Amino acid sequence: MPRALVGPWLLWGVLAAVAAALSLQDVLSSLSAASAEVDRALVLYSLAPRIAVALLAGAALGLSGALSQAALDNPLAEPATLGVFAGAQLALGVAAILAPAMGALGREAAAFAGGAGAATLVLALAWRRQLDPVTVALCGMVVAMVASSLSAALILSRGDYLFALLIWGGGSLTQEGWRASAAIAAVLGFGIVWALLLARPLGALAAGEIGARSLGVPTPVIRIAALAIGVLLAATVAAEVGLIAFVGLAAPAFARLSGARSGRILAVSPVIGAILLWLADSIVRRLGEGDAIPTGAATAILGAPLLLWLLPRLVLADRPTAPERRPRRDPARMLAVLAALAAGSIAAALWVGADAHGWRISSVAEFAELLPFRGPRVAAAAAAGAMFAAAGVILQRLTANPLASPEVLGVGAGAGVGLAAVLLGFGAVSWPLQMAGAGAGALAALAVMLAVAGRGRLGPERMLLAGAGIAALCLAGLNAVVATGSPSAFALLAWITGATDALGPDQAIAAVVTAAALAAPAAATLRWLHVLPLGTATARAVGVRIGAARLALTTIAALLTGAAAMIAGPLSFVGLVAPHAVRAAGLAGAGPHLLGSALAGAALMTIADLLARTVIFPYQLPLGLFASLIGGGYLLLALRRR
Amino acid sequence: MRLAAIDWAMLETTLALGVAPVAAAELVLFRTAAVEPVVPRSTADLGLRGSISYEQLLDTRPDLILISPWYENRARLLSRIAPVANYSIYEPGRRPYEAAIAATRDLGRRIDRSAEAERAVAQADAELASARTRLARSAGRPVLIMNLADSRHFRVFGADSMFGDVAERLGLTIAWSAPTRFGAFPAVGVEALAAMTEAIVVNVGPSPPSALAAVRESPLWRAMPPVASGRFVGLPAVNPYGALPAAQRFARLLADGLEALAVG
C-alpha cells in the first residue's frame, strides 16, 4: 500500500478505538463488583444490543449508500436523497393507523414498501433525464418533502397516538433486546452476498457502458438489482431504529477520500459506516441521559460540514442549459390575465365553502358573517404566496437558475431552524419575534448557500444540489426538535405543515403590511434583476456594483421567505412554481416577471387555502400541505421536461 | 344554553353536567382515545383541535364557547362567534383534580346547573372513594404511570398530572420524581425501570399492540424488577388531559387493574 494511503486507515483505526474505549467504559461501569441481576440485564439486553445495532445499522447504511451511488453513478445518492426514509416514515404512519396490531414483520414490510415506492417514483421521474445526478437529487428532495409534509399532517391529525412516529424521526438507537440487531444482521448478510456478486458488474459499469455490456447482463438489470438491495438495507434500518441521516452519504464519501476506488468502495463503506455510527452513538450516550439527543439527529449535524465540504469538490459536468424557446407575449395582456386569475381565486376562496352536504357558494348574508373568518386566512395566504413568488423571482434571477427558489435552496427550511431556535430559547413568544427568528434563519441559510455554491461562479446544477443538501439538513434538525414531543415541538410540527388555524386579523394585517413593505425595495432592485442574469461582465459593464446588489437582493429574498414561511410553512414550492410558470408563459422582463409571479403566487396559495378548508370538511388540512402537493407536482413535471 | 367545547376536558365537563354540546372538536379521536363519556351523535364535529373549523362552529350557533389556555391565541377570533369562557385545569402548582372540580362548579354556575355540578362532583368523589376502598391492600405502594409509545419508549406521568393526582388520592404514591412538563415527561427509555424495585407499572392506553407485546416478550422488559415480578398493569385508553369523567374512569380502571393483579 502506498504511504499516502496509510494515514486515512490509521485515522479510522483510531476512531474505532475511541468508540470501542467509550463502549467498554460504559459496559465496565455498569458491571462493577456490586452489580445486581438488573445491571447485568441492562448490559446484556440494552447496552450491548445498542452497540451492536449501531455497528450493524451503520454498516447497512454504508453499504446501502455505496450501492446506490455505484448504481446511479451519483456521489450524492443515498437513502435520504432517494426519498427512501421519507417514504418509509409515511408508510409506517399509514400502517400504524390502518393496522395498529401489525407486528415487527409488518412494520418492516410497510417500511420497505414505502421506501421502495418513493425510490421508484424518484427514479421513474428522473428516467427521461437518464437518471442524471441533479435530476435524481431534486426529484428525491421533492418526493421526500411532500412525503414528510403528509407524515406531519398525519401525526397532527392523530395527536399522541402517533408519538412513536415522532420518536422515529429522531432516530433513536435505544434497544430492548436483540431482535432489531438480528433483523438488520440478516438483511446485511443478504446484502453483502449480493454486493459481492454485483461488485464486478458495477465496477465494469463505472468503467463505461461498453465494458459492462461485455458481461452479458443488461446494464439496467445490474443497476436495478444494486438499487433494490440498497433500498432494502436502508428500509430495514428505518423500520428497526428510525431515521439515521447522512451515514449512507458520508460512508462512501469518506471511503473515496481515504483512497478507495471502484470495487473497494463497496467493501470499505460498510466498515466506515459502522465506525461512524458507533462513534456518534457512543458520544451521544455520554452527552445525555436516555434519548436526550436522538442519534439520528446527531449524525445529521455531523453530516452538515461534510456536505458543505463535499459540494464544491464534486465533479459534475455542468451541462449547458439548452436555450429556451419562450413565447413572447404582450406583457400587459399576460399581466391582465394573471391579475384576473388572482382576483378570481381570492373571490372563490372568500365565497366558496363546504358544509355537511358538500361544497356551496355562500349567500350574501352568509358571506358577511363568514368574512371575519375567511378574510384573514385568504389575505394572509395571498400575501404569503406573493412573497414566496417574489423571493423566487429574485433568487432565480440572482443565480441565473430557472429552478432556484426559497424551498429548493433550503431557505424555507432555514427559516424553520430560526423559528425553532426562537421557540426553544424563549418559549411561546409573540408573532413578530417568531417572524424575526424565521427571517434570521432564512438569511443564515441563504448566506451559507451562496457562500458554498457561489464561490467562483458555480454552475446552476451545483447550486441546486447545495440547496437540496441544506434543506435536507435543516429538516433533519427540525425532525430532531420535533422528536422531543414538547409543546414547542407540536407548534413546530404545525408550522412545518403550514397550519393556518391561528391566523387572525392581526397576523393577516402583519403579512400584508410585510409584503407591501418589502415590495418597495424589491421594485427598486428591478434594474439589478434585469441585468444580473446576463452575467457579471455585462452587469459590471453597465455600472452595477455586483457585491452590493447581491447582498441587497439576498437580504430581501430571505426576509420575504421568512415572512411567507411563517404563514404557509417551508415546503410549499410556490416560490418555485409561480416564477417558473410565469416565465414559461412569456413574461421575461424583470418588472413583468416580478409582478406576474406575485399575482400567480397569490392565486396558487389562495386556491390551496380553499382546498385545505373544504376537502374533508369539517376537518381541515394544513395550507402548506396542499401548496406542496400542487407545487411539488408541477416541479416534478418541470424537472422531467427540463 | 347551546355550548360548544373546543377543549376536551370541557367537553367532558359539559357532558358531566348533563348537557349535550352542540359542537366539539376532534370527536373521531375522542371516541377512541377518551372513550368516556359517550358523546351524542347530535354533537357536530369541529375538526382537529389544532385546526378547528370556524365555519362549522358558526353554523351550530353556540351561545358559549369553552376553551382552555391552550387555545388562548384563538380566543379573539372565537369571540366573534359567541362569548368565550376559558377554563384552566392544567397549570403549574395546581392539582388537576381540584381544578377539575372548580371548573365543573364554575361552569355549572355559569349555565344555571349548579345542582347538576354538585351531583357530578359528589359522583366523582364517590367513585374515587370506592376505588380507594378497593385498593386498601395496596395503600402506599409506588406506581409508575406511563403511556407506551413504542416498544422502547414511554411517556411518564408525574404527581402533577391528573393520573398522578388521582393515584395519590387512591392512597398510592408516585414512583416518578423527576421534573415533568405539563404533567408528563416525554420519551423515557426502559432503563428507567431498573431502579424501581418496588413500583407497580401502570400503562394507560392507547398504546400500539406491538409495544405491549414487547413488554411481555422482550428480555429487557422481562428483566426489569416490576415486570419480572408480574407488577405490570395495562389499562384501556383514558384521556390524560381530561376533567372529572376522565378522573373517574382512571380511578375505576386502575382499581380493576390492581385488584386483578392482587388476585392473579
Image: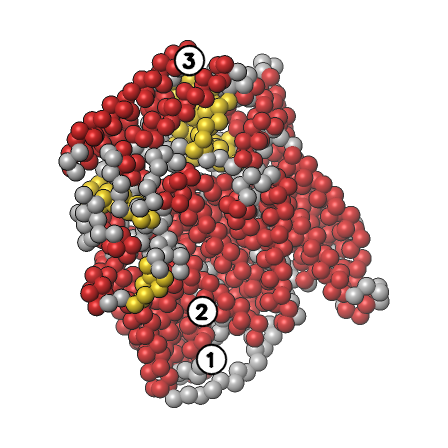
- Label ID, residue B138: 3
Residue drawn at (24%, 34%), measured in percent from left and top?
A: B17
Q: Position of residue B144 (x, y in %)?
A: 44, 23
Q: Are marks 2 and 1 on the same chain?
A: yes
According to the picture, the residue beneath numbered tag 1 turns out to be A584
Residue drawn at (53%, 71%), measured in percent from left and top?
A: A637
Residue drawn at (53%, 44%), measured in percent from left and top?
A: A96
Q: Secondary structure at mark 3?
A: helix
Mark 2 is surrounded, within 10 Å at the Cα level, by few (under 14), some (14 to 19) or many (20 or more) other residues, namely many
Residue drawn at (62%, 30%), measured in percent from left and top?
A: A177
Q: CA distance from mark 2 to mark 1?
A: 12 Å
Q: CA distance from mark 3 to mark 2?
A: 64 Å
Q: Secondary structure at mark 2?
A: helix
Q: Secondary structure at mark 1?
A: helix
User: In the displayed structure, would residue B125 be above or below residue A291?
Assistant: above
Residue A496 lies in quadrant: bottom left
What amino acid does circle 3 point to?
Answer: Ser
- Pinpoint the chain carrying mark 1: A
* For marks 2 and 1 on the same chain, the one whose residue lies earlier in the sequence: 2
Residue A218 lies in quadrant: bottom right
> Which is more foreground, mark 3 or mark 2?
3
User: In the displayed structure, would residue B102 be above or below residue A54?
Assistant: above
What color scheme is it? secondary structure
User: In the displayed structure, would residue A483 be above or below residue B199?
Assistant: below
- Pinpoint the chain carrying mark 2: A
What amino acid does circle 2 point to?
Answer: Leu
According to the picture, the residue beneath numbered tag 2 turns out to be A576
What amino acid does circle 1 point to?
Answer: Ala
